[in-house]
């Protein structure tokens, strides 16, 4: 498919063949963008290429023309639009290998949602370690309420792309926009990054409450107060508080805390029902980013003097320091105070 000027669309590469990376690569493919999907696991690439089905997204039959590469250099050859979708804790390793193959005029878009636990870095900060200042000046973040399965099925979805470069975010907006996938723009990279990462922690809490058979009142309280915690941290790190009222903040938070397709909410539900974290994770193939992001967010909040009681209690549950019901009681019995956001 040509772009609006009649020129062929730029070559794209999606690094990470999990459910979300596959859904984004499929969206670009169906949009007419030439795209290569890279899988860290050669066996997954082989399975997709031979069967047309990704084990991480088994309900979606991929087109015969959809191809996956297991060679990073081949996947990135000629790519000018590069989407990184590796799990947050492995992003640095992937970028270390990928950096030499990334063209200096490429636009790099992070679609991963997490905080690197070893350094407490956002994904833009991780990318900045390996990519040139020239590339980082165009760096973009894609986030918002978007379950991979629903995007792959063509369910109407709205997301946001953030970049400090107006030209870059507009280019990405045009590349991804379809009649079923609406892309808004935002200059607030920090806010969009944090909204996408910290909502996974609050989703764990919402899942725990559901697993304990608490009702809608509890869910509403966790979502609202969770948003307050995300906003406080964001403001402390220089984000625009208005960002958290948008798709990357409230939108993604509501989806992840209430949707049954949410892996983080599912982990929380099972914790609330009495299962061990080790047993839950052993039973899951896909990554629930909130599990590793929680201690990173708690440490980041402590570093900046930001009060995040929900995050702290979730971390205590994950560490096995406190039963879920006790954590909820501790939240309810905190000292009375005014409702505050930032």
Image (cartoon, rainbow, N blue to C red):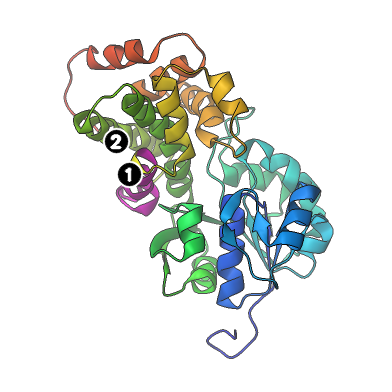
With 218 as the anchor, is 156 left or right in this view?
right
Residue at 53% x, 28% y is: 291
For disc 1, the marked residue is 254
Disc on res. 165: none
**Residue 163 location, x and y as percent?**
51, 58
Q: Main secondary structure of the magenta part?
A: helix
How many badges with numbers are in the image? 2
**Which quadrant, please, contains the N terminus?**
bottom right
Mark 2, secondary structure of its residue: helix
Residue at 38% x, 15% y is: 324
Mark 1, secondary structure of its residue: helix
Residue at 44% x, 31% y is: 201
Quarter of the figure with residue 272? top left
Q: Nearer the viewer, residue 41 or 252?
A: 41
- Residue stretch rendered in magenta on the structure: 241-257
With 46 as the anchor, is 340 left or right in this view?
left
For disc 2, the marked residue is 223
Separation (CA) of disc 2 from disc 1: 7 Å
Position of residue 222 relative to residue 162, above or below, is above
Residue at 29% x, 48% y is: 245
**Residue 169 location, x and y as percent?**
51, 65
* Crowd class of label 1 (few under 14; some 14 to 19; many from 20; radius 10 Å): many
* Crowd class of label 2 (few under 14; some 14 to 19; many from 20; radius 10 Å): many
**Which quadrant, please, contains the C terminus?**
top left
| For marks 2 and 1 on the same chain, the one whose residue lies earlier in the sequence | 2
Identity of the residue furthest to the bottom in this view:
6
**Residue 248 location, x and y as percent?**
40, 50
Residue 162 lies within the magenta run: no
Quarter of the figure with residue 185? bottom left
Position of residue 177 relative to residue 241, above or below, is below
Task: Please report contact status of discs 2 and 1: CB closer than 8 Å, yes or no.
Answer: yes
**Residue 227 location, x and y as percent?**
31, 37
């Amino acid at each position: 498919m040509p772009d609006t000027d009649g020129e062929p669309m730029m070559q794209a590469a999606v690094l990470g063949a999990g459910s979300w990376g596959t859904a984004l690569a499929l969206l670009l493919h169906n949009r007419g963008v030439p795209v290569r999907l890279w899988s860290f696991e050669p066996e997954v690439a082989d399975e997709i290429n031979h069967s047309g089905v990704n084990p991480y997204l088994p309900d979606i039959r991929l087109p015969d023309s959809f191809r996956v590469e297991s060679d990073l250099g081949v996947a990135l050859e000629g790519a000018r639009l590069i989407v990184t979708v590796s799990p947050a804790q492995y992003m640095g390793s992937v970028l270390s290998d990928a950096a030499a193959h990334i063209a200096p005029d490429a636009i790099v878009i992070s679609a991963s949602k997490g905080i690197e636990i070893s350094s407490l870095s956002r994904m833009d900060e991780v990318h900045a370690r390996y990519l040139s200042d020239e590339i980082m000046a165009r760096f973009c973040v894609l986030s918002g309420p978007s379950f991979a399965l629903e995007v792959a099925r063509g369910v109407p979805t709205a997301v946001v792309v953030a970049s400090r470069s107006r030209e870059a975010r507009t280019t990405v907006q045009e590349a991804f926009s379809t009649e079923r996938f609406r892309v808004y723009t935002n200059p607030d990279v920090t806010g969009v990054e944090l909204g996408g990462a910290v909502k996974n922690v609050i989703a764990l809490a919402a899942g725990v409450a559901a697993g304990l058979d608490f009702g809608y009142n509890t869910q509403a309280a966790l979502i609202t107060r969770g948003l307050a915690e995300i906003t406080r941290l964001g403001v402390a790190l220089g984000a625009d508080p208005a960002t958290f009222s948008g798709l990357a903040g409230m939108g993604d938070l509501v989806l992840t805390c209430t949707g049954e397709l949410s892996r983080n909410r599912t982990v929380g539900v099972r914790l609330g029902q009495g299962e061990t974290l080790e047993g839950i994770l052993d039973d899951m193939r896909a990554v629930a980013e909130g599990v590793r992001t929680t201690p990173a967010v708690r440490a980041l909040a402590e570093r900046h003097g930001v009060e995040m009681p929900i995050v702290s209690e979730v971390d205590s549950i994950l560490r096995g320091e406190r039963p879920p019901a006790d954590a909820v009681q501790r939240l309810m019995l905190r000292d009375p105070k005014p409702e505050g956001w930032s």
